Amino acid sequence: MNDEKLSEIVNRSGFPLQIGLEHLINETHRSHGWKVIFSEHSWKNSSDGCSGFIDLVLENHYHTSVLIVESKRVLETSWIFLIEDQTQLQRRHAKSWLLRYLNGRFTYFGFKELTLEPTTPQSQYCVVDGQDPKSKPMLERICADIISSVEGFANEEKELHISDREQLRMYFGVIVTTAKLKVCLVDPTRISISDGKIQDASFRDVPYLRFRKQLVSHHKVSGHHAIGSHSEISRAKESTVFVVNAEALTQFLQEFEVDGSSLRGVV
């Protein structure tokens, strides 16, 4: 088998993209302040029994924010995200895992709603051409694993942060993909009930966005949410994963910043 055939085999895997992204992040470190602290990092989540390998773990220069990155290489494919509410085109909130260690104890360890840049569209629906309609959607499968790995990695670090020092760590799930990211703005009143097709939809390219959904089933709703509204219950079970086009990764890292006001009550 010649080198060309061997290269084709290698290029059918996702490893070259993962290696290329790691190199890009390290080479552009001065422009955004992030660095790769782990690649191919094994994880296990005792809450749901899931395990695997995290492609890349990034840390910002303040040592407070951590990105759990899954690289996803696809060929000549667009991921289309449906948005039926224009207020979802500019969203700053995201659900992340937060660790706070203060005065010899963990004062916070779990998911928390945070406000952060970049402002992006937010969607809970993703359409990928050629996907088997009878199987669990591809993006939901990937994101569920990412959220589980975020929790697993945070628990791993929790054991390392038992010390006399104060600690604040925020963990976010990210997919970096070669897919083109499209937003489809849908008017619900223009959807045909007879055939379920959209009419007069508008499409736009975006460099990155928030995918927010009830991605895992083992997260329980607290008593506070159980007696609240249905929307409160839904929000309590949701998680956020950022989806980033690979060519826009450095821009995403440059813009990523948590709004300190959303940490009031924790810090």
Image: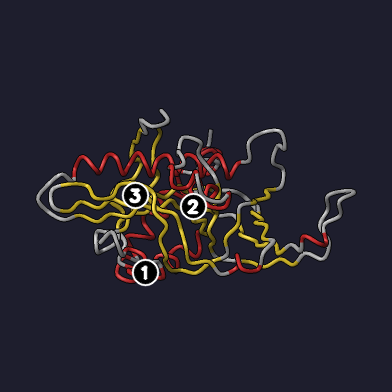
From this viewpoint, which residue is outermost toward the top? 49
Task: Tell me the residue that label 1 is attached to.
Answer: 259
Give the residue type that dot 2 points to: Val
Residue 255 quadrant: bottom left
From this viewpoint, which residue is outermost toward the front? 227
Place of residue 196 in the rendered image (x, y in percent of width and height, measured from the top left): 83, 49
Place of residue 239 in the rendered image (x, y in percent of width and height, measured from the top left): 48, 49
Task: Tell me the residue that label 3 is attached to.
Answer: 57
Q: Label 2, label 3: how many angstroms apart (C-alpha)?
A: 14 Å
Q: Label 1, label 3: how many angstroms apart (C-alpha)?
A: 22 Å
Q: Residue at x 65, y 62 (%)?
A: 183
Q: Which of the marked residues, 2 or 1, is nearer the chain's N terminus?
A: 2
Q: Which of the marked residues, 2 or 3, is nearer the chain's N terminus?
A: 3
* Residue 4 in sight from this viewpoint: no
Place of residue 119 in the rendered image (x, y in percent of width and height, measured from the top left): 50, 69
Q: Residue at x 40, y 44 (%)?
A: 55
Q: Residue at x 45, y 43 (%)?
A: 146
Numbered mark located on residue 159 in the image: none
- Residue 156 sits above or below residue 193 on the image: above
* Viewer-closest of 118 and 15: 118
Give the residue type that dot 1 points to: Asp
Task: Tell me the residue that label 2 is attached to.
Answer: 241
Q: Which of the marked residues, 1 or 3, is nearer the chain's N terminus?
A: 3
